[in-house]
Image: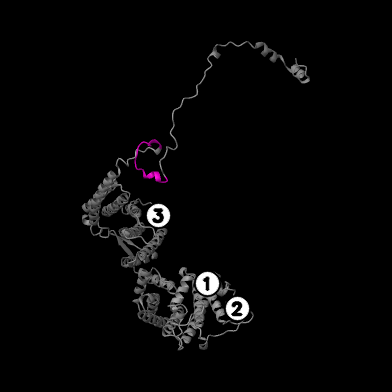
Amino acid sequence: MAAERQVAGSGGGNSGRGGGGGGSSATGPEENKENEKPKAGGLGDSLGLESILPATSVLQIIKESQQQHGLRHGDFQRYRGYCSRRLRRLRKTLNFKMGNRHKFSGKKVTEELLSDNRYLLLLLMDAERAWSYAMQLKQEANTEPRKLFHLLARLRKAVKHAEELERLCESNRVDAKTKLEAQAYTAYLTGMLRFEHQEWKAAMEAFNKCKTIYEKLASAFTEEQAVLYNQRVEEISPNIRYCAYNIGDQSAISELMQMRLRSGGTEGLLAEKLEALITQTRAKQAATMSEVEWRGRTVPVKIDKVRIFLLGLADTEAAIAQAEEEETKERLFESLLSECRDAIQAVREELKPDQKQREHSCEADSGKVTNIQYLHSYLTYIKLSTAIKRNESMAKALQKALLQQQQPPDEDGKRTPRPQDLIRLYDIILQNLADLPQLPGLEEDKSFLKEIGIKALVYKAYRCFFIAQSYVLVKKWSEALVLYDRVLKYASEVQAQAGTYKNSLKELPDVQELITQVNAEKYSLQAAAILDADDAQEIESPSQVKDGKPLSERFETFCLDPSLVSKQASLVHFPPEFQPIPCKPLFFDLALNHVTFPPLEDKVEQKAKSGLTGYIKGIFGFRS
């Protein structure tokens, strides 16, 4: 209770050591305003939490506090610190202190104190602080199992504070909405406590009670107010199904898996338990899976991780097909690719000793691919195919965004998509298709190679189409027209070669639709080119023709030059051009070759005769 005994500073408690210390210690004017006493009026004699913050409910107070103070990023320690600081500010504002610096004396909120509805917030923040500490311990219990006991103690404390809040809300001075929300909040925390104790029946009853209350509240208010209630119902539903499964309802596991796939994972107490349950269920099913067939060859599967991945592949693909939002699809694709990479890594670890054994073996049959190598090729094919589908899904989303560009742009300042973004995606798709024929065991599969070749033609056609679109944006009409012809060429090749491969090419983009679009674009391109040429002719009138000369060289000629009033006006040539100038004359002394100089042999001989004697005479000054 260090937080309660600490003396608060000015401004509503600026100290940051409360409740385990997470989060910022500075309190701004907004945190102080939330503890001020609301103005009278509007609710009569009823006392409800919505009078603390206008048009706010218990659940809304909790959600806003959680989102603004750490839980947006899963930081329960920061939220716990916020709850401690807010409790300290409330107690100081209400003069409801728990003793002094030297002695603690506990106080309880009674019904007589409900003249101020901020006393209800005391109990609510107490429960939230205990709950956030329990969730923090839940994260830390993965490495320290002993913290599970502390976790259960804090959950029991949270339930105790919630029950006290519910008891006080039974007063006639509290409105009906707050009473129901207090009951739902207590039922939610009780369900979480029973869930951790693995008392599935009691937990299911508590969660069902909470769900029923929130559903009734959602139906009684407007759609805007019902959003939070519906979100809480969606959070509770996986817990209820998990409890039903543990009670004995075997059909709940399929619903749990669908919920997990649609939401991309669960949070809170259920996350680890649900992951373990799904893994355990797939492991049981994997025990009966011994082989897989692909491209007419049956391969035994002995690696458990690969079995589990192959069993969940169909469910994930079905969830991707049913997903409506692009973010959900992207999340599911990433999850599938991650699981596929793990399975490939497990096969590679088994493949290393197999390769060493083949190198040391005396068998001459080196051309046939082993079963483990063929399984590796199959998993790599799944990975590359999934990457192609993901990029194709992203390309479709970008195409829709390109079609909507005619609408006014958003005020968010977001970057609008361009055809170059689609070109990059189709480049990646073509690279993935180029990697497929190189997989071991598929070099001689002519049907497979033919199918990959047709798919490559389809994506080349779309790539050329968007390259042409990028040229249209910069008014390069001839280049765009050539590329449109290339698109039609690729499309006609696809239609000519499809034949017996139509069933395997159903998932590809429609080539006939592309041909129709290209023909329409060609007509519009030709019209735009003609109009652009006419505009150019109109602009090139005698009074507007420029010959490229700067202003200093055409003073005698009148022409309209808008560049003269711009920052890049052409006034003079700079740097100036080089001009020829007369060079400095060179003088050559030709008489030097005909001059006879006097002989100097006598002077040279005297200098040669002077030796040590001359040197000494020179020192003492006797040199002649």
Q: Position of residue 540 (x, y in %)?
A: 30, 42
- Magenta stretch: includes residue 566: yes
Work out whether 624 lies above or below 575: above
Mark 3 against mark 1, which lies toward the viewer? 1
Q: Which one is earlier in the sequence, the residue at label 3 or at label 2?
A: 2
Work out whether 480 lies above or below 87: above
In the picture, measured across the screen, residue 586 lies left or right of residue 602, that is left
Mark 3 burial class by Cα count in 10 Å: few <14, some 14-19, many 20+ = some
Q: Which one is earlier in the sequence, the residue at label 3 or at label 1?
A: 1
The number of numbered badges drawn on the structure is: 3
- Residue 325 shows up from this direction: yes
Per the rendered image, the range of residues in magenta is 552-567
Judge by depth and name the residue closer to the eye, 490 or 52.
Answer: 52
Judge by depth and name the residue closer to the eye, 43 or 233.
Answer: 43
Judge by depth and name the residue closer to the eye, 2 or 459.
Answer: 2
Mark 3 against mark 2, which lies toward the viewer? 2
Q: Position of residue 278 (x, y in %)?
A: 39, 71
Label 2 element class: helix
Find the distance from the CA under tag 3 to the CA under tag 2. Answer: 69 Å
In the picture, measured across the screen, residue 432 lies left or right of residue 46, that is left
> Quadrant location of residue 58?
bottom left
Q: Which residue is mark 3?
A: 355
Label 1 element class: helix
Q: Which one is earlier in the sequence, the residue at label 2 or at label 1?
A: 2
- Amino acid type of disc 2? Arg
- Amino acid type of disc 1? Pro
- Amino acid type of disc 3? Gln
Work out whether 480 lies above or below 622: below
Identify the residue shown where x is 70% and y is 13%: 606
Q: Which residue is mark 2?
A: 5
